[in-house]
């Protein structure tokens, strides 16, 4: 169990950090959403991601200009009106990295607690056996 938790935590951290294999997947998905932004599903997904994360395009606002798409309002700060500088690939990766670190820390703590419980359980069983043997000798 401990080993699986350590391996799972390592995999989680590897696939949710900067320059990991999740970044090309996010980039490809965001660019596909931009190209097909006339579809309601793509438009809603872009709006949700860009508004809630505070990002614009896959790598920044230039993605829209390169694809000759208008810059949506979701790409702009509601207070200043300026376009968000960072693209959603980096913003989502930073978001996932922050959350996955906490998940990995909690998993490692739980693995340590389970290991301690197993060790203490073995010690308790051995102590009970010794006590039982001592009682049988009397």
Image: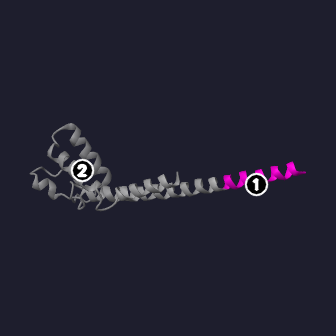
* Label 1 sits on residue: 127
Residue at 86 percent across and 48 percent down: it is: 136
Q: Is residue 131 left or right of residue 57?
A: right
The quarter of the picture where residue 20 lies is bottom left
Residue at 15 percent across and 55 percent down: it is: 63
Q: Is residue 115 left or right of residue 14?
A: right
> What's drawn in magenta, residue-wise?
120-138
Residue at 54 percent across and 58 percent down: it is: 109
Give the x, y percent position of residue 134: 84, 53
48 to 15, vertically: above or below: above
Q: Secondary structure at mark 2?
A: helix
**Main secondary structure type of the part rendered in magenta:** helix
- Tell whether position 133 is magenta: yes
* The residue positioned farthest toward the front in the image shown: 137
* Label 2 sits on residue: 74
Q: Nearer the viewer, residue 132 or 66?
A: 132
Give the x, y percent position of residue 117: 63, 53
Callout 2–callout 1 Cβ contact below 8 Å: no
Q: Is residue 73 left or right of residue 133?
A: left
N-terminal label among 2 and 1: 2
Q: Secondary structure at mark 1?
A: helix
Q: Nearer the viewer, residue 28 or 95?
A: 28
* The residue positioned farthest toward the right in the image shown: 138
Q: Nearer the viewer, residue 118 or 42?
A: 118
């Amino acid at each position: 169990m401990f080993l699986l938790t350590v391996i799972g935590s390592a995999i989680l951290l590897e696939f949710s950090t900067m320059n990991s294999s999740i970044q090309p997947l996010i980039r490809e998905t965001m660019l596909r959403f931009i190209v097909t932004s006339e579809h309601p599903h793509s438009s809603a997904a872009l709006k949700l991601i860009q508004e809630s994360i505070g990002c614009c395009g896959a790598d920044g606002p230039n993605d829209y200009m390169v694809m000759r798409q208008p810059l949506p309002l979701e790409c702009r700060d509601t207070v200043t009106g300026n376009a968000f500088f960072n693209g959603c690939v980096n913003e989502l990766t930073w978001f996932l990295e922050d959350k996955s670190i906490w998940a990995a820390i909690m998993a490692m703590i739980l693995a340590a607690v389970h290991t301690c419980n197993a060790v203490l359980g073995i010690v308790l069983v051995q102590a009970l056996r010794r006590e039982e043997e001592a009682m049988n000798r009397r």
